[in-house]
Structure formats: C-alpha cells, structure tokens
Amino acid sequence: MTLDPGAGANRAPARPDKHFHRIGSFEPELGGSLEEVKLAYETWGELDASGENAVLVVHALTGDSHCTGGPSEAYRRGGWWDEIVGPGRTVDTDESFVVCSNVLGGCSGSTGPASIDPGTGRPYGMRFPIVTIRDIVRTQKRLLDDLGVRRLRAVIGGSIGGQQALEWAVEYPDFVEKVVPIAATGALGPQGIGMSEIGRRAIMADPDWQGGDYYGTGRSPETGLSIARMAGMMTYQSAEGQWERFGRNPASRPALYEEFGGRFEIESYLHYQGRDLAGRFDANSYLYLTRAMDLYDAGAGYASQEEAYSRIEAEMLFVGISSDWLFPASEVRETAERVRNAGAEARYEEIECKSGHDAFLKDWDQLRAVVGPFLND
Amino acid sequence: MTLDPGAGANRAPARPDKHFHRIGSFEPELGGSLEEVKLAYETWGELDASGENAVLVVHALTGDSHCTGGPSEAYRRGGWWDEIVGPGRTVDTDESFVVCSNVLGGCSGSTGPASIDPGTGRPYGMRFPIVTIRDIVRTQKRLLDDLGVRRLRAVIGGSIGGQQALEWAVEYPDFVEKVVPIAATGALGPQGIGMSEIGRRAIMADPDWQGGDYYGTGRSPETGLSIARMAGMMTYQSAEGQWERFGRNPASRPALYEEFGGRFEIESYLHYQGRDLAGRFDANSYLYLTRAMDLYDAGAGYASQEEAYSRIEAEMLFVGISSDWLFPASEVRETAERVRNAGAEARYEEIECKSGHDAFLKDWDQLRAVVGPFLND
C-alpha cells in the first residue's frame, strides 16, 4: 500500500496535480474481487497534525477528482466546483485539507471497467464486478486512512455524490462530523432507474459496444453513449428551465445528425452534449456507475433504512432542488425527515430554481447561501 | 376517388371492419407530394340524411382506426377506447356516426413510409415527405367529405390526437360543433421534443435501420424502436404513479436483456413495452409521427396562435391531466385560456390522477365524467 503520485498515467493531457494511490485488493459487496485497486485523487490545503481538518468532496456521475482550479490545458472548463471549493470559499482550502477522488468504477484515473485486469492482462470490460455506493465509499475511506486523515470535518456531494455522502454518514458514523447530501435520497425512484436503463440499452445496442470489449478495437460505442447522455441530460433539467432556455427555438448550430434532426435548439443541444460526453467518458463506466446509482439503498444490509439512519452521528444537511426531477425535492425532504425520525440531526434546505437537478453545478449563489453557514458555523 | 372497402390488404390478421379509402394525390404543407394517399378507417353507427351526426375519434401515436370493439383475433386487446365509444357510451354509436381513421404517415393501413411509392415501385422509407398535424387533418377531411359527412358533432382525441382535434377547430371552423383536445396543447415543449429525439436517435443508430430502407431486407430496427418506446413510456407516466406501480421492486419477469439488466420491475416493464411495440409498429412511422408532434404549432401559417384561435367557432373542452409530464396540465389550461382570450368558447377540465399522460387511455371513470356532459348536453 503506497502513496504513488504520478503512477498509472492515463491518456489525458498532463495533469500534474492528479495523484494515484494503490489501495490494494478490494472485495465488492455484491461479489467478485479486484486484485489491485487504484484511486486517482487530488488534494488542496494542508492536513494538520491532528489529521482531523479534512473535507471530502465527492463528484457526480461523469465528474472527476478535479473539483477546483481555473481553466487550463488539462481542464478546459476548470474544476467542476471551483465556485465552491478554494481559498476562502464555502469549502475553504485555507482551513481544510480537501480531498477529491475519482470513484471506483470510474474512468478518470481510478480502477474501472477500462482498467487492465491483472489476472488476464486485458481490460476488465463487463467482467468488472458490480460496484455499489458502499464499495465506492469504502475505497475512499482506505485512501483517506492512507493519507493520514483521522476524521472528516465534512463530506459533501451532489447526485450520486450525495448518495455517497449519505452512505458515509451511515457506514462510518464516528469518522464524519458533518455531511451534506445534495439532490440525493436513500434510494432512487423508478423514473430515474427507467431513464438510466434507456441509456444503458442504447449503449449495449450499439454494435461498437462489442459486449463491452471495445478497448483497443478502434471502435467504441460513442453513438450509444451519446444517446445515454441525452437521456441523462433530460433528467438533469426541468421542463420550466428548458422552456426558458430552449423553448421551441430553431437549432442555432448545424445538426449533428442530418437525417430528420436538428430542427430545434433542444435537439442540437442534446446532440452536442451527447457527443461531448462520448469524447471524454468510458461507456462501460457509464453502465456501472448508473447501475450503482440504481442499486443504492441506504437500508441495504440493515433491517430498514431507519436502522441504517439510526447509526448516524454526523450533523446532516440535506439539500433539495425545487425543480429536480431525478431526485425530487419532496423525496430529499422525506429522506431528511426519516433520518431525523431515526434519531440523527438532520436539516433540510431547498434551492428554489428552474435549473433542475443540475442546480448544484450552476446555481452558485444559492448553493453557497445554503451550504456555507452549515459547514462554517 | 372511390370508397374502396377491403383494398390494400395488409399483413395483419383479417380485419373485416377496416376499410380503405383512396383520397387521391396529396400535397403536404412542408413540401413533397404523395401521388396516391389511402386511409384506413372504421365506422360505427349510421350517418343520418343530414350528414351532420358524425363524430371523428382521433387516435394517439401508436394507435389505429379500431377505437371500439371487444377483444378478438385481430385485436387481442379490443378497441383502444372501447370504454368511451359504443352504444350508449360517452361517444354514442346509437346516436352518432363515429369515424376513426389511421393517420397519414401511420402504419396501420394508411399511407406512410412503409407504403409503396407509385413513382418507384419501392417503399418510401425516408423519401416519404414530412407530414404535419395539419396534413393529417386535411386528409381526414377528405375522407369525411367522401363518406358524405357534412358537419361533425365532435372531434375528440388525446395527445397527438388532441393536437389534431385542436387543429380541426382552427382549420375547419364551420365544420365542427364541439372539439375535445385531451392532454394536448398548441405546441409541444422542449422536454417532450427532447424525449422524442432520444427515441429517434435510437432508431436511426440501429444498424438494421439502414437509412430507413429496411423493408424486405429481413431486418428492421426493432432494438432502436424498443428504446424509443422505452423513452416514450417514461413520458406517458408520472413519477408518483411509477412509485406506486413499480417502486423499486425486483423484476418479476425474466430480463429480456441478460447483460446487466432486468434487476428492477420498471426495467423489465420497459423492456417488454419496447419489444411489444417493435413487434407491431413501423419504426419509420414512429420517426415521422413524433416529428409531426414536435412540429405542431397551432399558430403556424398565422400571425400568432391567437390569430389561429380567433378562427375557432366550435365549443372547445380542453382536458388536462394533473400528473401529465408530456403535455403538463398547466400548459393545457393555458392553451384553453389563450383560445378563450382569442374569442372562442373554451372550457378546461382536469383529470386528477397519478397515471400521467396515459390517463386518457385508462382512467375511464374520470374521462367519462369530464367529457360526457360536454358532448351530450
């Protein structure tokens, strides 16, 4: 078990701040095993002598470990939470040692389906074991242990990151002081699962998917992944927000797909979003991570969600988004209530906006206003 | 121009009640031309001497002309509105001459992309011209003229059928007495367009689609059409209804797709719905008819929707569905208000339910309660 900065270089542009850490072998809770797991991570700020000033920031489905930093060659859009994480910001890197790692099963440096299986010398593909939110959290814990973190001031994340935050509170109750699950609940509803399954079917129906063994073939299921992304994007936005932003405006960019397409701006937007993701994300990771979202049930392994929640010692702040369709605000609020009823301390705050689920990646003022006082009291 | 019962037999089981009528050539409003258009239709009841006791029932996206009748060999589920249309029912076939025709661009007997282009002797495929809601209505008008109908007591339909009903009121103001658009507005929103585009992309990405020229090749884009149907089904139901019906229950049927799938009931349900449609519907018709839905703008060709609505002479009843996500109730209500503000007579009623958009195909009691008094006053 070694801290191994710079190992396992990937194909992306040089990313000097990204480190790679081998946590050794790992047994996913639903079966299978991984001989050698590596996590890509970044840190900001300094860990103090107590090892208790750390904050774990958890990324969303297609995010990565680069949660803060301005635009650069390696990260043309900069860090995905640059408005929230940094010196003097809501998650204050002057005060805290901030860690963000790419999730197990991901494709931005951590071990996932695109990684080489040491047992065969070939990429795992669909032989990668199913991983769960709990597995992801357990590997994060190993990383933090190895980094010398003894306790977390906070865990914070949205969407699948919010599921991880909640699971942190349940799985490691005495390790975390404050937990902020944003736009997440203890279990995704059938509408969300259904939308994910549409995306998975589109990937698997793409002949370039090749049963998941597309690595090194010169072909990959970009079309299927694009369609999956289009379906995902629909769940990240609200009807009202789309009316305002796209309406029925004609496409302002040339159609990506000549046949019959590209008439409306919303279509053009979805095409470009799809192509963008297909150029930067691994389709098998998309399958595994959406499945982890579907499968997450905070009560799994306990008699009930209530029993799981009764373990929680952290102060919780659940943040709902009024226009969220994937994790509706009403369900986030209900989760907070169930946690409170189970005896834990849990507040609920709501971001009022038209942005939909994606508000935690764009409505900065409201997010700061809601999260800042809780984290920095 | 001949009434031509039984002509143009299709591949389906014998359907003795279905008639086929040639309306001759037709020029779609957005260009192209169709040399010979045929509409499949059925009628119930008797047209009286005045020719003014007819009711036109308009089907939804994947429906057909068989709106009433019990289960039979040809129609294993019976008529799609058997609870609404029949002797003594809300649309009373004892009192009215009821006509229902398969839409232009469809695949249940009427001319569509699967039809033979007389100019080439081959199926149109994607050489079929874009058809609009107005085109569909204009061809229906020709059929009714040829059947001897001089005025309609009512036009009624839901979803794309509701768009047609509204267009009837605008296009032929002095031909219709009452019009009932259900779960439809003057223009579909970007979320609905986006969901349709996901389905279209899935069809077109299927290698068996072959640019639309799959007829007679022994292959057709069933996988793509299945995925399109899955996306469609999501828009026909509500989050609350899906929680109640599917929750996070495990799949009760074997998975249709082994890889990674079939864990949840909602997934299994979507798989089966997808496969069912792929077995009975033409993928190109799906492309053309969803595009007609997207393109519909009641104000097209007028200075505004208001100008279009000011033409209306019929009494209108707009029916919204409280849990509808495709045509939200708020937008249906707003359409009714705009029609009223334009000087026409328009009421609005709402079906309160968890069924989502599909309520007009299942919540019979409420539908009858709302529509019956309006039609039969």
Image (cartoon, coloured by chain):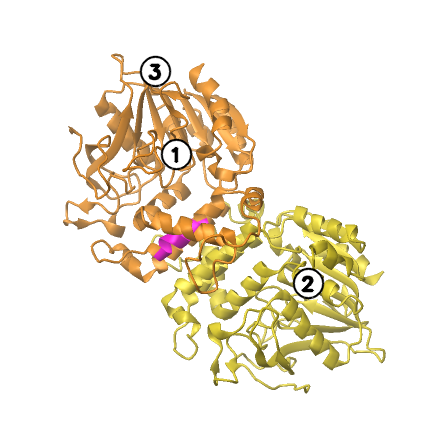
Chain colours: A orange, B yellow
Q: Is residue B152 left or right of residue B255?
A: right
- Are the residues under marks 1 and 3 on the same chain? yes
Specify the label residue A161 is tagged with: 1
Q: For marks 1 and 3, give the CA distance.
A: 22 Å
Query: Residue B225: x and y, percent?
Result: 46, 64
The image quarter in which residue B372 lies:
bottom right
Q: Which of A281 and A337 is in front in this view?
A: A281
* Mark 2–mark 1 distance (CA, rounded to whole Å): 44 Å
- Report the residue at 51% width, 32% height from top: A320
Badge 3: chain ID: A
Q: Which of B157 and A270 is in front in this view?
A: A270
Binning the other alpha carbons within 10 Å of mark 2 as few (below 14), some (14 to 19) or many (20 upward) gives many
Residue receiving disc 3: A95
For marks 1 and 3 on the same chain, the one whose residue lies earlier in the sequence: 3
Is residue A226 within the magenta segment?
A: yes
Q: Position of residue A318 (x, y in %)?
A: 48, 27
Q: Quadrant of residue A165?
A: top left
Q: Which of A221 and B236 is in front in this view?
A: A221
Residue B247 on image: x %, y %: 50, 45
CA neighbours of label 3 inside 10 A, class few (<14), some (14 to 19), many (20+):
some
The span picked out in magenta is A223-231
Q: In which quarter of the image is the N terminus of chain B?
A: bottom right
Residue B157: assigned label: 2
Q: In the shown orientation, is residue A287 left or right of residue B247?
A: left
On residue B326, which mark appears?
none
- Main SS type for the magenta part? helix
Residue at horizontal 31%, vertical 29%? A100
Disc 1 is placed on an element classified as helix
Question: Is residue A243 in the magenta section?
Answer: no
Observer-side mark, 3 or 2, equals 3
Residue at x 39% of width, y 34% of height = A161
